[in-house]
Image: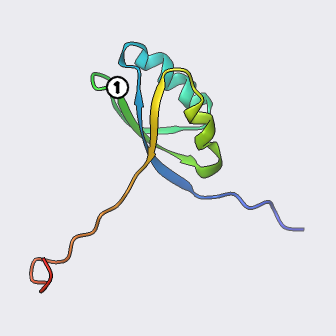
Amino acid sequence: MSEPSRSAPVGVVLAVDPDRFAEVVEALRRAGLTVTGEQPVLGTLVGTVVEERIPSLEAVDGVESVDRERTTRLPPPDSPIQ
């Protein structure tokens, strides 16, 4: 028998109500978010979560947006395309 497949964690950036920051962050942790950085004054935080849990994060009261992290790669400085 094989184990059920589970997706790898993805990076997310969240905007939350800055007036309720600590409360919302704790609710996000309970919903499955592993917090890797916090900016309480700005009302933003970053973390990782399995893909299937993103709707749970979006449903937390006080969450304004959930975006997946994106990686942008630039060509090396000596590349012909700049």
The residue at 55%/31% (across/down) is: 29
> Mark 1: which amino acid?
Gly
The residue at 27%/69% (across/down) is: 73
The figure's colour scheme reads rainbow
Q: In which quarter of the image is residue 36?
A: top left
Q: In which quarter of the image is residue 64?
A: top left
Percent position of residue 14, x then y: 42, 36
Percent position of residue 18, x then y: 36, 19
Left or right of residue 49: residue 3:
right
Percent position of residue 17, x then y: 41, 20
In this rendering, is residue 45 above or below 49? above
Q: Quadrant of residue 7?
A: bottom right
Residue at the extreme left: 78
Left or right of residue 72: residue 10:
right
Left or right of residue 44: residue 56:
right
Q: In which quadrant is the C terminus drawn?
A: bottom left
The residue at 53%/23% (across/down) is: 26
Q: Name the residue under label 1.
A: 43
The residue at 12%/86% (across/down) is: 80
| SS at mark 1 in the image | loop
In this rendering, is residue 82 above or below 44? below
Residue at the extreme bottom: 80
Left or right of residue 43: residue 24:
right
Q: In which quadrant is the N terminus drawn?
A: bottom right
